[in-house]
Image (cartoon, rainbow, N blue to C red):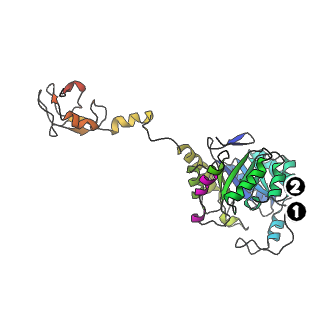
Amino acid sequence: MPEIILNGRSVGPEHPPLVIVEVGINHEGSVEKARQLIDAAVAAGAEIVKFQCHITDKEMVPTDMKPGEISDERLWDIIARCELTEEEERGLQAYCTERGALYLSTPFSREAADRLDAMGVPAFKIGSGECNNLPLLDHIAAKGKPIILSTGMNDTASVRRSVEVIRRHGVSLALMQCTSLYPTPYEQVRLGALRELADAFPDLPVGLSDHSLNIWTCLGAVALGASILEKHFTLSRQWPGPDTGISIEPVELQGLIEGSRAIWQARGGSKQVLADEQPVMDFAFASVVTIAPVPAGAPFTRDNVWVKRPGTGAFPATRLETVLTGRATRDLPAGIALALADVALPA
């Protein structure tokens, strides 16, 4: 089965879904806010809290470009405002460890990847914007750590090129279906792409990095085989910031973690009777019973036998027609389940 291991945590179809809590830049550059978000994520049951490692002048050239409909602010200004120093990132990493959560971060440049590698992160989560950045993928994969790759804005052919670059370094890899729209309309989440990715890369776990509102599409993804889920997280959607409007709040995160595990436990299986269902079968099923006295030698008819609970009689309801071909072997009172010895069937 496809599987990757993150700091000892196995991730794949045979294991409960891994929920990546994407703080991202929802801290707005405030370490105190970041610590509050870690606390809230851990309280909701988070295993991994993920940030973004931005070194502004290393990942972009000065630009007045704005991030589409996400914000009216210049992209440069957003990133610069939310940038954390290496010391601050190391402090947050230590705080995650103290709270029992794994710290991950997404690099957006060679320098960011080098910083995170020096910090000892156990894996790299790559955003959709870098999915086809083959030079950066090659640089990151060369560090020999597991990679979780989001694939928004890329088709399967493009993803295959990226996978080939990463595979050259022999690192374990997982792929995330993603739609880079903020928020993503439900009809454009495309959960069907999970199966397409799984079919194209059968040895790789697949997951969903989701930007739709609520947690519903993530829960649906688990039923379709997603092993990893990623959602932006905030304490309140009233906080400022370009990603807070599409983020889930603590109560939703708790529902996502608990719900995804429940759905994972429920998926699979086959349509067969379980031994554990027998006690319910005993009282819920029906048996052939007498509904009027039946003299010895008299034929059984629908006037003197019918089907009633419980299902513990010798003749289940499915055998009523068989009983109706027979006769009573003894005087039978009304209101009893027929025993095998009570029925004489034709030879």
Confirm whether residue 183 shows in the render. yes
The residue that disc 1 covers is 58
Of mark 1 and mark 2, the one earlier in the sequence is 1
Vertical position of residue 116 compared to residue 306: above or below: below
Q: Residue at x 70, y 61 (%)?
A: 154
Instruction: Give 282 or 320, whichever is nearer the viewer.
Output: 320
Q: Position of residue 316 (x, y in %)?
A: 29, 35
* Amino acid at circle 2: Glu
Instruction: Please state the extent of the stretch shown in magenta in the rendering.
Output: 184-197
Quadrant where the image shows the N terminus: top right
Q: Position of residue 109 (x, y in %)?
A: 84, 59
* Amino acid at circle 1: Lys
Quadrant where the image shows the C terminus: top left
Vertical position of residue 197 compared to residue 68: above or below: above
Q: Which mark is residue 86?
A: 2
Instruction: Give 150 or 291, whichever is nearer the viewer.
Output: 150
